Image (cartoon, rainbow, N blue to C red):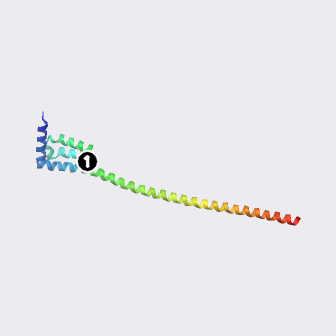
């Protein structure tokens, strides 16, 4: 059974090995570009995996950590960013459409309110004119009868 000091020493030796560093860099690059599963397959099929057969467990733990931290492959990130851009454009389009619809609604409503106001004023003027004419007609009749 390994002690913590032995594990630490083995890891330091492993990370000190230039070949392992190169393989780890390729592994991380593969994970970022194509995803964790592709990177695991790469490691298992590559010379690095054959040269360092027990490093697979450590890389497995690193990939778990990588996933837990929320890191995603650059392909997925680009897809999400493209979708985000499309959604922003659609939101802008929809906002503009709603703004235009509201403007048209307010314009039509304003025109209808203005027309209704003119109709009311015209009717009021007509009623007042009729009342005035009736009043003057009544006064004329009263003068002619007296």
Q: Residue furthest right?
A: 146
44 in relation to 109, above or below: above
Residue at screen point 28% across, 51% down: 75
Mark 1: few, some, or many residues within 10 Å (few <14, many ≥20)? many
Say if residue 51 shows up in the picture: no
Residue at screen point 65% across, 62% down: 118
Task: Answer left or right for 79 relative to 23.
Answer: right
33 in relation to 68, above or below: below
Residue at screen point 25% across, 47% down: 35
Q: Nearer the viewer, residue 126 or 31?
A: 126
Task: Answer left or right for 124 relative to 32.
Answer: right
Which corner quadrant of the image does residue 110 belong to? bottom right
Tag count: 1
Q: Residue 14 placed where, x, y %?
A: 12, 44
Quickly name the residue at label 1: 35
Q: Residue 2 placed where, x, y %?
A: 12, 35
73 in relation to 142, above or below: above
Q: Secondary structure at mark 1?
A: loop
Which corner quadrant of the image does residue 143 belong to? bottom right
Which corner quadrant of the image does residue 109 belong to? bottom right
Q: Residue 62 placed where, x, y %?
A: 21, 43
In which quadrant will I find the C terminus?
Answer: bottom right
Say if residue 35 shows up in the picture: yes
Residue at screen point 24% across, 50% down: 32
């Amino acid at each position: 059974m390994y002690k913590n000091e032995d594990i630490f020493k083995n890891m330091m030796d492993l990370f000190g090995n230039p070949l392992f560093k190169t393989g780890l860099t390729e592994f991380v690059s593969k994970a970022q570009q194509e995803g964790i599963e592709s990177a695991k397959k790469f490691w298992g099929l590559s010379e690095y995996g054959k040269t360092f057969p027990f490093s697979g467990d450590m890389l497995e733990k690193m990939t778990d950590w990588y996933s837990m931290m929320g890191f995603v492959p650059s392909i997925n990130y680009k897809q999400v960013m493209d979708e985000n851009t499309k959604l922003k454009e659609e939101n802008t389009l929809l906002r503009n459409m709603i703004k235009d619809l509201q403007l048209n609604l307010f314009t039509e409503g304003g025109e209808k309110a203005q027309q209704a106001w003119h109709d009311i004023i015209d009717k009021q003027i007509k009623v007042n004119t009729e009342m005035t004419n009736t009043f003057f007609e009544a006064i004329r009749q009263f003068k002619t009868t007296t």
